Image (cartoon, rainbow, N blue to C red):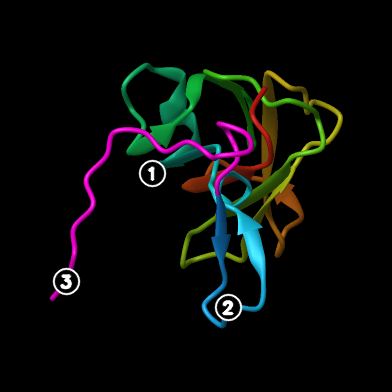
Amino acid sequence: MASILKVDELQGITSAGDITITSEGGAATQSLQQGLAKCYFQNNTLSAYTTAGNTNDSFNVSSFTDSTTGELHFSFSNNMSQKGFSTVANASDASINDFATTNHDTVSTSGSEIILYDTGSSGRIDQPASCAIFGSLA
């Protein structure tokens, strides 16, 4: 018989903010909080972010700024604890070869920036983009 556990909040015994989970094989443990995305967003066109309410989906993003062609700066609703967080970003359009990268010169605990490129022309492009941030919240 299956059990259902319904709770509104989990707290660790040693530290309230530290929940450890055991791997599928039982040989390793990992901090639950470290494995969760702390920020993400997805849109259909980069320039659509300049108008409020045009994101398809987002979490922990307070604002977007379309800096110039292919550059998107975003601010966090809740800051990261340090600038050493990991960013996973991509651009996608079936008609061109494109990719996204983080602009490490603009990374801060309060936000970051991604740059979108067409690898065929090496130019910056405004394309659909997705991004997820992993690391520790402040």
Label 1 vs label 3, nearer the camera? 3
Residue at the bottom extreme of this rendering: 25
Q: Nearer the viewer, residue 36 or 119?
A: 36
Whether residue 105 is situated above or below residue 95 in the rendered picture:
above
The reply to whether dot 2 and dot 1 touch (C-beta < 8 Å) is no
Q: Residue at point 67% right, 71% down?
A: 28
Give amino acid for label 2: Gly
Q: Quadrant of residue 2?
A: bottom left
Calculate the distance from the C-alpha at mark 3 to the C-alpha at mark 2.
Answer: 21 Å
Residue at the front extreme of this rendering: 13
Calculate the distance from the C-alpha at mark 2 to the C-alpha at mark 1.
Answer: 41 Å
- Circle 1 residue: 44
Q: Residue at point 45% right, 26% down?
A: 49
Give amino acid for label 3: Ala
Residue count near mark 1 (Cα–Cα under 10 Å), binned few <14, some 14–19, many ≥20: some
Relative to 71, 22 lies left or right = left
Residue count near mark 3 (Cα–Cα under 10 Å), binned few <14, some 14–19, many ≥20: few
Query: Sequence order check: which comes first, mark 3 or mark 2?
Result: 3
The reply to whether dot 1 and dot 3 touch (C-beta < 8 Å) is no
Query: In the image, which disc is placed on residue 26?
Result: 2
The reply to whether dot 3 and dot 2 touch (C-beta < 8 Å) is no
Whether residue 116 is situated above or below residue 27 in the rendered picture:
above
Q: Nearer the viewer, residue 60 or 32?
A: 32
Q: Residue at point 74% right, 39% down?
A: 85
Instruction: Find out whether residue 10 is within the magenta segment.
Output: yes
Label 2 vs label 1, nearer the camera? 2
Looking at the rendering, the stretch of residues picked out in magenta corresponds to 1-19
Helix, strand or loop at label 2? It is loop
- Circle 3 residue: 2
Residue count near mark 2 (Cα–Cα under 10 Å), binned few <14, some 14–19, many ≥20: few
Q: Nearer the viewer, residue 92 or 137?
A: 137
